[in-house]
Image (tube, rainbow, N blue to C red):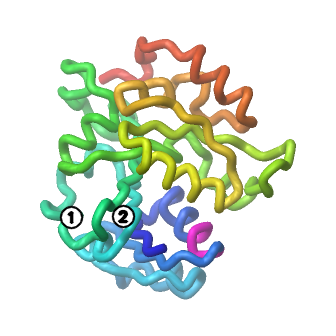
Amino acid sequence: MKIGIIGAGNIGGNLTRRFTAVGHDVSVANSRGPQTLTALAEETGATPVRVEEAARGAEVVVVTVPLKAVPGLPSGLFDGAAEGVVVIDTGNYYPQQRDGRIAGIEDEGLTESRWTERQIGHPVVKAFNGTYAQDLLERPRPAGDPERMALPVAGDDEAAKAKVRALIDEIGFDTVDAGGIDDSWRQQPGTPVYGLQAGVDAVTKALAEASAERPADFRG
């Protein structure tokens, strides 16, 4: 499968490593340009590209940039993607630590991923946002392993969500359906599932126990 990754930080870099390790054709981009991705490309076999080219021909595109950078992504970003491209959003809102106050989230009550959809003009599936980057490399397990971690996945399009869940299974993790994008607050920062290193039952329980009240640390 051809996968584009926009953002080569901790999550983007390690997803590049995991997706190439299981045989996918990965293009990776960052804000500083492909010349800064030479080492990652040599390590993984991924193709470094400009952000404008990251989605070209891709069946799946991962957007893994700070929320404050999302409005600055190029317009028409997905125009050259494969038909039915699935977009994965790994983003989190950190108003005090990084992003500043975002009115759509604070005043309109949008979930982080619903706000992101509006900025990029494409539906998203929310995944990997509460996963420690190092876990992507250190904690993959085969299906059925009692130590296998589960990751929550939210999205409105059931087919797109199924594709993402299959991809996550392929790189060594179980998944739990976390509902639609308007339900994705259940996996935002400050919720019980955020950063949880546990299996399906514990992740399911944590999602159910989430409060819709955003903790003070994660409000602008």
Q: What percent of the width, then of the height, locates residue 161?
A: 46, 46
Assign a secondary structure to mark 1: loop
Q: Are marks 2 and 1 in contact (CB under 8 Å)?
A: yes
The quarter of the rendered structure image containing the C terminus is top left
Q: Quadrant of residue 177?
A: top right
Give residue 94's quadrant in the image: top left
Instruction: Give the x, y percent position of residue 165.
Output: 56, 49
| Identity, as a three-letter code, of the amino acid under mark 2 | Ile
Q: Main secondary structure of the magenta part?
A: helix
Q: How many marks?
A: 2
**Disc nearer the start of the sequence (2/1):** 2
Residue 141 drawn at (x, y percent): 78, 55
Does residue 154 appear anywhere in the picture? yes
Look at the picture and state if 153 lies above or below 57.
Answer: above
Magenta run includes residue 20: yes
Left or right side of 106 for 26: right
Residue at the spot 60% in from the left edge and 28% down from the top edge: 193
Viewer-proximal residue, 172 or 218? 172
Q: From what the image shows, is residue 92 above or below residue 74?
A: above
Give 71 or 199, whichever is nearer the viewer.
199
* Badge 2: residue crowd in 10 Å (few <14, some 14–19, many ≥20): many
Q: Quadrant of residue 82?
A: bottom left
**Is residue 78 within the magenta segment?**
no
Question: 16 or 67: nearer the eye?
Answer: 16
Residue at 49% over, 13% down? 211
The part of the chain drawn in magenta is: 17-21
Vertical relation: 207 (above or below) 91: above
Image position of 194 (left or right of 118):
right
- Side of 100 where 92 appears, left or right: right
Seen at 58% across and 75% down, the residue is 20
Label annotation for residue 77: 1
Q: Which residue is mark 2?
A: 6
